[in-house]
Image: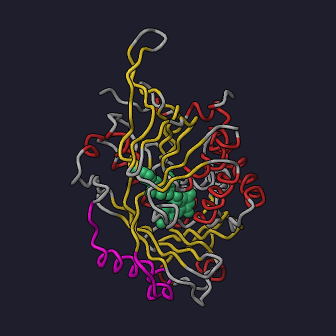
Amino acid sequence: MKTYDWMVVGGGITGAALAYELVKKGLSVILLEQQRKPQNATSYSYGGLAYWSGTTPITRQLCQEAIARHYILSQELDAETEFRQLDLLLTISTDSDPDVAAASYAHLATPPRLLSIQEACELEPLLNQKAIAGALTVKHGHIHAEKTTQGYIQAFLRAGGEMEITQVLELQTRSQKNLLAESEVRFTGVKTTTATFHSANIVICAGGLSRQLLKSAGIPIKLYFSHAEIIKTPPVELRLHTLVMPANQQRFQLEAESTQVDELWNQPGNQPVPPILDGGAVQFLDGSVVLGQITRTLTDPDGKVNSEESEKWLRQSVGKILPALGKLPGTWHHCLVAFSSDRLPLIGAIPGFAGVHVFSGFSNPLVIIPPLARRFANFVTGQEDEIIAQMSPGRYIMSG
Ligand SMILES: Cc1cc2nc3c(=O)[nH]c(=O)nc-3n(C[C@H](O)[C@H](O)[C@H](O)COP(=O)(O)OP(=O)(O)OC[C@H]3O[C@@H](n4cnc5c(N)ncnc54)[C@H](O)[C@@H]3O)c2cc1C
């Protein structure tokens, strides 16, 4: 019976990056992912790297580290991440005041620049000038999140890591006495659809399913998930020059409001706040486009969404801002996205539950996952890290 040093549950970008950094520390690591070709948040992501958006000394420092890391990641992983810089265009709706919109970004490390309607349309010729009062722009990073994840996984395997395609059904425990002779629950492995795996440490990177998995093991945690809906097109002829998103992203407000009553998330069938749509789009290097995004707070991860209505809403809203995109051929997709209630991720050991850790709940994660995965691996092998300590789930853990 093999016991690994670390077991990583979930092969999206968080799990892939973490598994890679852990194996590089010389640890024995197994990565468990339930889908051979995951249909997860990573695969439907826009891929934007908001390295300009730090608000606190910690997030500014992380963003600086992050962009340096993204510059060399492709070379380090020996895989194409498609990292590049592109112009982000934050559209200001006709019922908003452009100066107020610009002021709401003034506290960020690099505040976006205000553009007139004409300047915005010069930067992004596909924009409908009648649908905006102006726009903001800033240089944004961009990667192909799915290819980056694959790059991490291949580099992880080359470095001696193991991976299984299997669904984790439950976390397994053993009662033991700790040094103070108090009883504590220690997690020692997982039961999956194919086998039982043993590990000294388990880290949950299961994205929007992390809360459910932890809850089924009796671990309460303030980690939430939204249902995201998008349309993905095949490669198309037209060229989108920028990554387009609304200046006023309703998603962040929705996340804050929907988490005010944690109890609502313990029963399926609730919808703490109504759905929102942040109309935007991005084109990847192969010419495919993602049109997004609806965010819904159904507390049931399997909650049903009417795909026809959702697609119609997406096409109408994106089509209003970018008329040429609304009618593109494409397929509607749905996935879950994890988030926390304060926009900082939950990283580290879960107090009171030995052997189980979490690395999830990132709001805008792609930029900061690479440095945080590396910091996590350094931290668990003995290096102090003030940033990791501040992201501990201990800041939230609830009694009972
Ligand atoms: C439309 C859209 C646009 C986005 N745009 C951006 C952006 O521009 N910039 C940005 O920074 N972020 C963006 N995000 C968010 C970002 O993409 C996600 O937060 C991130 O990819 C999440 O990665 P993850 O590894 O936590 O989760 P996921 O990618 O969802 O991966 C979790 C994995 O865990 C697996 N899993 C779950 N349960 C189990 C189990 N029991 N056993 C085994 N495996 C399991 C799942 O199959 C899944 O593959 C966007 C998200 C969406 C949906």
Image: 258 above or below 146 = above
Looking at the rendering, which quadrant does residue 273 occupy?
A: bottom left
Which x, y percent locates residue 249? 47, 61
Image: 74 above or below 399 = below
Please state which of residues 387 and 371 is positioned toward the viewer in this rendering. 371
Q: Is residue 400 magenta?
A: no
Residue drawn where x is 38% and y is 56% of the image: 226
Image: 290 above or below 342 = below
Query: Can residue 257 be seen in this snapshot?
Result: yes
> Which range of residues does the magenta coloring cover?
303-332
Q: Residue furthest front?
A: 1
Q: Is residue 320 magenta?
A: yes
Looking at the rendering, which quadrant does residue 332 occupy?
A: bottom left
Image: 366 above or below 90 = above
Residue drawn where x is 53% and y is 35% of the image: 3
Which x, y percent locates residue 395? 46, 30
Query: Can residue 100 be seen in this snapshot?
Result: no
Left or right side of 163 for 319: left
Which x, y percent locates residue 284? 61, 75
Q: Main secondary structure of the magenta part?
A: helix
Tell me the quarter of the image containing the C terminus: top left
